[in-house]
Image (cartoon, rainbow, N blue to C red):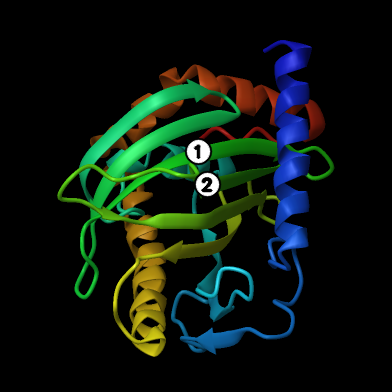
Amino acid sequence: MTPDSADTLYRTGADILASARARGLPLEAGNLGDGWELHNPDAPDGGQYASRLDDKAQTYAFVAVREFSCTPLQFLCYVRDFDLGKLAGDLKLFKVHTSTPELQRVEYVSVLPWPFEPRWALADMRFGVVKETGALIVLGESVPDTTPPAGHTLGTVHYSYYHISPHPSGDAKRCVVRRAINVDMHLPLPAFVIRKALAAHYYADMGLADKDLEPSVWEACGLAKRLAEGPAYAAIEAAVAAVAPVACKP
């Protein structure tokens, strides 16, 4: 890793964190803040789940906060290489158009449970390191002014954030994930129906992630190989190591 590549990851991390703050999204430690309606308050995974109306987009934003038994870099790999997991539903299409450590443009079609139709999206995923803490941070957003291919329904990713921080106990094989997501499904359904269905869907996402990150599943699905061999992960790991002494590889 060159100093320039590390600096790019730090700048990207700062930009992503600043954009989350500007949107009033609780990506950092502490209470969720005002305006969030809790879902699954007694979730057995110990997580926090909530939603609120996004005034600008006029669609609902959802947040999730919970711990995972994996390294921060493992969870980042799960987010970045989402064709091997379930974070975007069952994929009919997954194509990486461009890829650098700090940016990946992805085209995909995902099949989600009823009442959602398969959705097509072209999204830019930005990846950074929060220099002050060593946390990993991600922001996915739809590329503006895109039109889906014939026979596909557009899905607009207003934003999809992940803040992946080392566990406060110092255990290098655990992390804390804070997710904030706002996706417009463009469906002619009442807002309360969409809100309830998406709340259930995003809650289930975290359970699926927990299972996919189990060591046996992690090895079998190919994520371990991608993490070990991907140059982007080596660059990100080095950027973290330069500011945080705890290695994040398993």
Q: Secondary structure at mark 1?
A: strand
Quadrant that contains the N terminus: top right
The residue positioned 70% from the left and 76% from the top of the image is 32
Discs 1, 2 touching: Cβ within 8 Å: yes
The residue positioned 78% from the left and 14% from the top of the image is 3
Q: Which residue is mark 2?
A: 140
44, 233: nearer the viewer: 233
Q: Is residue 105 left or right of residue 63?
A: left
Q: Is residue 61 left or right of residue 147?
A: right
Give the mark, 1 or 2, whose residue is nearer the N terminus.
1
Neighbourhood count class around disc 2 (C-alpha, 10 Å): few under 14, some 14–19, many 20 upward: many
Q: Quadrant of the rendered structure where residue 195 is?
A: bottom left
Q: Secondary structure at mark 2?
A: strand
- Residue 134 visible within the image: no
Neighbourhood count class around disc 1 (C-alpha, 10 Å): few under 14, some 14–19, many 20 upward: many
Q: Is residue 189 left or right of residue 157?
A: left
Q: Quadrant of the rendered structure where residue 119 is?
A: bottom left
Q: CA distance from mark 1 to mark 2?
A: 6 Å
Q: Is residue 156 above or below residue 92?
A: below
The residue positioned 58% from the left and 58% from the top of the image is 177
Q: Position of residue 6 (x, y in %)?
A: 73, 22
Question: Disc 2 marks which amino acid?
Answer: Gly
| Mark number, residue 124 | 1
| Mark number, residue 187 | none
Question: Disc 1 marks which amino acid?
Answer: Asp
Q: Position of residue 156 (x, y in %)?
A: 42, 56
| Residue furthest to the right | 132
The residue positioned 34% from the left and 67% from the top of the image is 186
123, 144: nearer the viewer: 144
Q: Position of residue 128 (x, y in %)?
A: 66, 36
Q: Position of residue 84 (x, y in %)?
A: 29, 40
Q: Is residue 22 above or below residue 36?
A: above
